[in-house]
Amino acid sequence: MNSVLLDEVRAMQLELTQIRQDIHAHPEMAMEEVRTSALVSAKLKEWNIVVTEGVGQFGVVGTLKSLRPGNNTIGLRADMDGLRIYEENDVPYISTTPGTMHACGHDGHTAMLLGAAKYLAEHRDSFCGTVHFIFQPAEEKLIGAIAMIDDGLFDRFPVDAIYGLHNYPEKLGTFATRPGPVMAGGDQWVVTFHGTGGHAGALVHLTADLTVLQAQFILALQTIISRNIRPVDPAVITVGAIECGSFQSLNVMPSKLCIGGTARSLTQSVRNTIQRRMKEIATNLAADFGCQAEVEYTSVAVPLVNHVEQTKRTIEAAQAVVGEENVDQNMEPTLAGEDFSYMLLKRPGSFIFMGIKDETKFGNLHSSTYDFNDNAIPYGVAYWIRLVQQELSN
């Protein structure tokens, strides 16, 4: 455990906590990160780091070259956006934007990467090469990484490897990762059934009862997971919305019903199976009821797959900060999604999770009572610093 580095970083904690809480108080939704990106740019410039703004519209890249010669370059990425949730925390820095809050810790991610940038800018002789600090917009909508890549992120800021970090509700001072699939690919789907509407009482025999059809469709969806996917392959299908009929006209059987939701899985083959079987089930059930079905299936994010060699390197860096016993090298994959996956399709790299849970009340991720634990800031900053010094050592 590198207690010396942690002590050095803790000397910055007050400043970084103030930055984190300021970002928390002013959350911005995906592709609206005007104030946050301006704050990030201002801090980087204050520390004499070269700044490029507007990458992928609201993304910011800070570039730092070492004093010692070195040809290698790595990228470190943090996300900046908030969520459409009404905050219910009782804190002085509660969201000042009604209906929007930082419920996933992106305020903490941004503050920790800024802390690493400041430290490395003050210790340019501690590494050899170039670091790109990548502050990404719109992770929650899973579009920010693509926006930055399409804007030439890796052409304008070439890297040998790219690394990401996310907090999670495990013990403070711990890290977890694994090589291979770590997070799920995310899909959204909408099925629309069209049939003959009519009187819900006297003329029911002349209508296609779409409400019964949707009930059978929902039940049949679950058989995709239980009977078409291998039991060892994680996957989930969720119904998130149903629209049909009106409570103002309960005696009318609707002629149109829309049902939509999400699907998550860790491999492309499972995603393909879910999409194929969903269309087959919707089409065949609709035919049985004398209806028509339209299926829209949209890929939102690809599975996040860590590269083996870079994951070894992240494990080494985390162990140097918190000790071998506090780093889970083979964590269970999660069916949450993360658009850092698109960066890993373009460059080798790895994604790691950092525990933030102690006696501090912080709530669950994506909940109205979530609040990033400021006591975790030094661990994230120290991890980033150690990773840079390790990867750019000569």
Image (cartoon, rainbow, N blue to C red):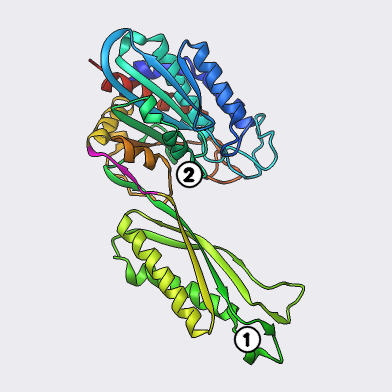
Looking at the image, residue 62 lies above or below residue 164:
above
Compared to residue 129, the image places residue 365 above or below, namely below
Q: Amino acid at mark 2?
A: Leu
Identify the magenta region.
Answer: 302-308
Residue name at image x 52 percent, y 77 percent: 292
Frontmost residue, 289 versus 8: 289
Residue placed most toward the observer, 185 or 290: 290
Badge 2 density bin: few <14, some 14–19, many ≥20, Cα 10 Å? many
Question: Circle 1 sits on which residue?
Answer: 207
Q: Position of residue 98 (x, y in %)?
A: 70, 40
Q: Residue at x 64, y 39 (%)?
A: 89
Number of on-image labels:
2
What residue type is disc 1 on? Thr
Compared to residue 267, the image places residue 14 above or below, namely above
Q: Is residue 363 visible?
A: yes
* Secondary structure of residue under mark 1: loop
Magenta span contains residue 220: no
Q: Identify the image quadrant of residue 280.
A: bottom left
Image quadrant in which the C terminus is located: top left
The tag earlier along the polypeptide, 2 or 1, is: 2
Q: In this orientation, which residue lies closer to the viewer: 188 or 329?
A: 188
Are the residues tagged 2 and 1 within 8 Å (C-beta)?
no
> Disc 2 marks which residue?
142
Horizontally, residue 152 falls left or right of residue 210, namely left
Residue 153: name its quadrant.
top left
Residue 265 x, y percent position in the rendering = 37, 56
- Choose top left, top right, bottom left or bottom right for residue 197: bottom right
How far is the residue under mark 2 from the one under mark 1? 41 Å
| Observer able to see residue 355 | no
Vertical position of residue 349 compared to residue 256: above or below: above
